[in-house]
Image: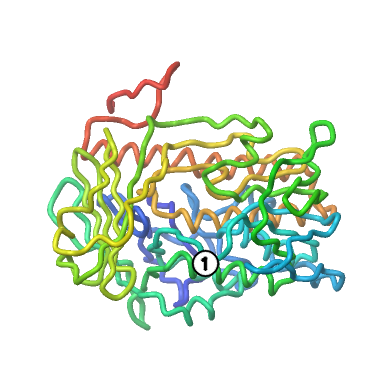
């Protein structure tokens, strides 16, 4: 969850309403856990149809600075020398010897970065370890993600996938139940998207192939290549791939950070979220997602497919692998899984020859609500800054500084707001304090 400026988005499918409410998110989608999150905000300036959605980071529209982080339409067509699109799930894994950008990871951050790089004429290679479709928990996406889908050219494919839509969510955050609606305009209500993640990831990766990206899949990134202090490519199962820039979009396993020795700063005690699926007709609140928080933690429930619910829960003290009591009449489907969602950030998320995007750069527990949104935005931003450096309009040092500031600002405001929200239902402030990272009580 975020401050009132967190999820302000531009270019929704319907015209922007100046009274648009803050679209903050729940564990896997939009929620407002207090009235502070439901305040209306004024757009800072009119929407420019030529500019991709500057969906709000923790303090508003995503701009590392007015000049540096504004993403723009591609400056030139895709280079006709773009590599062949090898390597679908059953394709070959042989890479070209060199390229402009090599990306490790084919999730939302990696695919978004690849699409944007290719549109700027950069020769791009993407490595994805797993074959698709791959298992990922379902995602509840607020309406503000739609402008990004349009900018990436996947809006029609997303609509054709038939993901369920929803008007808002039910919330009980240490108090009575209430329904939080996204809002509406003259054309009707704004609707969130309940995305089946395996399908969404495949849509984005196919769009990258269609843009001219050379996708090697399955193909594992083994280690970064170095010349002095600079990252100059990736050693992979397909061989060495030299590139002027490397993007780590491998998610929370922090591939480049581990291999290159980039420190990861932790900002909370260890947090483990558990999640799973239950089949049957849920007796909760119908077709809308539900968030319930109390002194022990929170649980999120969302219908993701007909007669199938996804659930996610986080206990502050210890993981709970059991489905929520409200789903007791449903049949668990598949195993309960867990994920380390300890708040953490790679402060050096951009440097000589590299960028770290999405969850590879920072992780916040799912109550922050916008993991996919942040992944798409950070991937686009990294690609746009690389294109500016490549084109000579921006020094590499300035681009890296802009990306680091944007990532740090998002993380700082998210963790502050989450700690405040958790303090409403528990006296523990999850932010670390001082040597040893002691948990301190709320002021």
User: Residue sitting at 36 percent across and 75 percent down?
Assistant: 164
Q: Is residue 27 left or right of residue 402?
A: left
Give the SS element for disc 1. Answer: loop
Where is residue 287 shown, x and y percent of the image? 25, 72
Say if residue 1 shows up in the picture. Answer: no
Q: Is residue 94 left or right of residue 55?
A: right
Q: Which residue is mark 1?
A: 133
Give 128 or 77, whichever is nearer the viewer.
128
Q: Quadrant of the C terminus?
A: top left
**Which residue ends up furthest to the top in the rendered image?**
435
Where is residue 58 shown, x and y percent of the image? 46, 47
Give 149 or 92, whichever is nearer the viewer.
92
Say if residue 432 shows up in the picture. Answer: yes
Where is residue 152 shown, x and y percent of the image? 61, 70
Where is residue 320 shown, x and y percent of the image? 25, 43
User: Residue sitting at 63 percent across and 72 percent down?
Assistant: 207
Q: Is residue 133 left or right of residue 169?
A: right
**Callout count:** 1
Q: Is residue 225 left or right of residue 67?
A: right
User: Residue sitting at 27 percent across and 40 percent down?
Assistant: 315
Q: Residues within 10 Å of mark 1 (few under 14, many from 20)?
A: few
Q: Quadrant of residue 225?
A: top right
As displayed, is residue 332 above or below residue 231?
below
Q: State the scheme by which the image is colored.
A: rainbow
């Amino acid at each position: 969850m975020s401050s009132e400026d967190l999820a302000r988005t531009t270019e929704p499918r319907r015209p922007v309403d100046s009274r648009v409410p803050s679209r903050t998110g729940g564990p896997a989608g939009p929620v407002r856990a207090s009235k502070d999150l439901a305040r209306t905000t004024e757009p800072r300036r009119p929407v420019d149809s030529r500019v991709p959605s500057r969906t709000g980071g923790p303090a508003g529209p995503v701009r590392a600075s007015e000049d540096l982080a504004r993403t723009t339409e591609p400056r030139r067509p895709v280079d006709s020398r773009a590599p062949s699109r090898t390597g679908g799930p059953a394709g070959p894994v042989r890479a070209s010897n060199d390229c402009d950008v090599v990306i490790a990871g084919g999730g939302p951050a990696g695919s978004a970065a690849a699409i944007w790089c290719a549109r700027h004429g950069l020769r791009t290679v993407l490595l994805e370890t797993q074959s698709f479709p791959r298992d990922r928990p379902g995602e509840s996406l607020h309406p503000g993600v739609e402008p990004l889908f349009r900018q990436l050219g996947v809006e029609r494919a997303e609509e054709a996938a038939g993901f369920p839509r929803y008007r808002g969510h039910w919330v009980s955050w240490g108090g009575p139940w209430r329904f939080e609606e996204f809002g509406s305009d003259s054309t009707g209500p704004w609707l969130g998207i309940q995305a089946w993640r395996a399908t969404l990831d495949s849509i984005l990766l196919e769009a990258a192939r269609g843009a001219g990206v050379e996708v090697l899949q399955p193909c594992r990134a083994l280690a970064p290549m170095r010349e002095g202090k600079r990252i100059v490519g990736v050693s992979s199962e397909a061989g060495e791939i030299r590139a002027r820039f490397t993007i780590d979009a491998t998610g929370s396993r922090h591939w480049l950070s581990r291999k290159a020795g980039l420190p990861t700063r932790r900002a909370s005690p260890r947090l483990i979220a558990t999640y799973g699926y239950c089949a049957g007709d849920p007796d909760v609140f119908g077709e809308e997602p539900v968030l319930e928080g109390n002194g022990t933690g929170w649980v999120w429930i969302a219908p993701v497919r007909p007669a199938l619910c996804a659930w996610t829960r986080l206990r502050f003290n210890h993981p709970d692998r059991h489905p929520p009591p409200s789903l007791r009449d449903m049949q668990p489907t598949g195993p309960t899984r867990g994920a380390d969602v300890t708040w953490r950030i790679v402060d050096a998320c951009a440097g000589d020859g590299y960028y770290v995007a999405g969850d590879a750069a920072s992780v916040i527990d799912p109550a922050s609500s916008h993991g996919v949104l942040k992944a798409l935005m950070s991937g686009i931003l990294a690609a746009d800054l690389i294109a500016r450096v490549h084109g000579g309009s921006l020094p590499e040092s300035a681009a890296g500084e802009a990306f680091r500031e944007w990532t740090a600002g998002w993380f700082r405001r998210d963790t502050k707001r989450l700690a405040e929200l958790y303090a409403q239902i528990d006296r523990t402030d999850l932010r670390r304090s001082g040597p040893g990272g002691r948990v301190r009580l709320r002021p």
